[in-house]
């Protein structure tokens, strides 16, 4: 068939990844806004109140740690301040609220293995 099939496939995959990322951001934004409408702006753990600029320190925690589980009645949500939320998750080592870009997670260093590194020495000694 077409010669540039590979190129098109790559472009398509890039678009899919971008779409998924955008949808995820959109969804997270939406459930946070919904949760903030449903609940008083108070941390469920420490009871601090948040308003105005401080409100961004109030985050949505998922009781079952499944951020795809977003029932309209908010039964899976809990509003936690970033500190209590952090606490909650450090117990489970769960990256739910950090999203996929978890600090310290993933990103293997580029391979330090050099397949031809020893070759020059080998040839030199071979003589
Ligand atoms: Zn708190
Ligand atoms: Zn959480």
Image: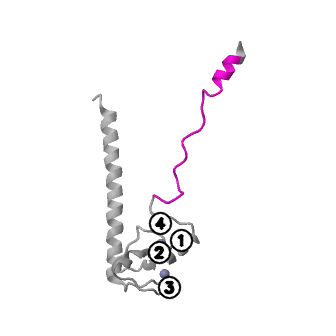
Say above or below: 12 vs 90. Answer: above
Q: Secondary structure at mark 3?
A: loop
Which mark is in front, 4 or 3?
Answer: 3
Residue 87 on the magenta segment: no
Q: Which residue is mark 1?
A: 89
**Quadrant in the picture for residue 117:** top right
Q: Is mark 2 within 8 Å of ligand 1?
A: yes
Report, in whole angstroms, how far the alpha carbon at label 2 lies from the one at label 4. 13 Å
- Whether residue 1 is visible to the viewer of this picture, yes or no, is no
Q: Which circle marks residue 46 in the picture?
A: 3
Q: Is mark 3 within 8 Å of ligand 1?
A: yes
- Whether residue 125 is visible to the viewer of this picture, yes or no, is yes
Residue name at image x 53 percent, y 71 percent: 89
Percent x, y of residue 61: 45, 74
Looking at the image, tell me whether mark 4 or mark 3 is earlier in sequence order: 3
Q: Which residue is mark 2?
A: 82
Q: Do the CB atoms of the residues marked 1 and 3 lie less than 8 Å apart?
A: no
Say above or below: 37 vs 124. Answer: below
Q: Do the CB atoms of the residues marked 1 and 4 lie less than 8 Å apart?
A: yes
Q: How many marks?
A: 4
Report, in whole angstroms, how far the alpha carbon at label 4 lies from the one at label 3. 21 Å
Nearest to the observer: residue 36 or residue 112:
112
Q: Secondary structure at mark 2?
A: helix
- Looking at the rendering, the stretch of residues picked out in magenta corresponds to 101-124
Residue name at image x 37 percent, y 75 percent: 71
Q: Secondary structure at mark 1?
A: helix
Percent x, y of residue 84: 51, 78
Residue name at image x 68 percent, y 21 percent: 122
Q: Which residue is mark 4?
A: 96
Nearest to the observer: residue 116 or residue 76:
116
């Amino acid at each position: 068939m077409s010669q540039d099939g590979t190129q098109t496939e790559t472009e398509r995959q890039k678009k899919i990844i971008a779409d998924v990322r955008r949808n995820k951001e959109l969804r997270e934004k939406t459930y946070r806004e919904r949760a903030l409408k449903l609940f008083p702006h108070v941390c469920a753990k420490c009871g601090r109140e948040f308003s105005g600029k401080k409100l961004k320190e109030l985050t949505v925690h998922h009781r079952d740690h499944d951020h795809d589980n977003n029932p309209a009645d908010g039964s899976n949500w809990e509003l936690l301040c970033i500190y209590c939320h952090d606490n909650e998750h450090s117990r489970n080592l769960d990256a739910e609220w950090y999203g996929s870009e978890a600090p310290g997670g993933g990103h293997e260093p580029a391979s330090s293995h050099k397949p031809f590194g020893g070759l020059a020495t080998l040839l030199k000694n071979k003589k």
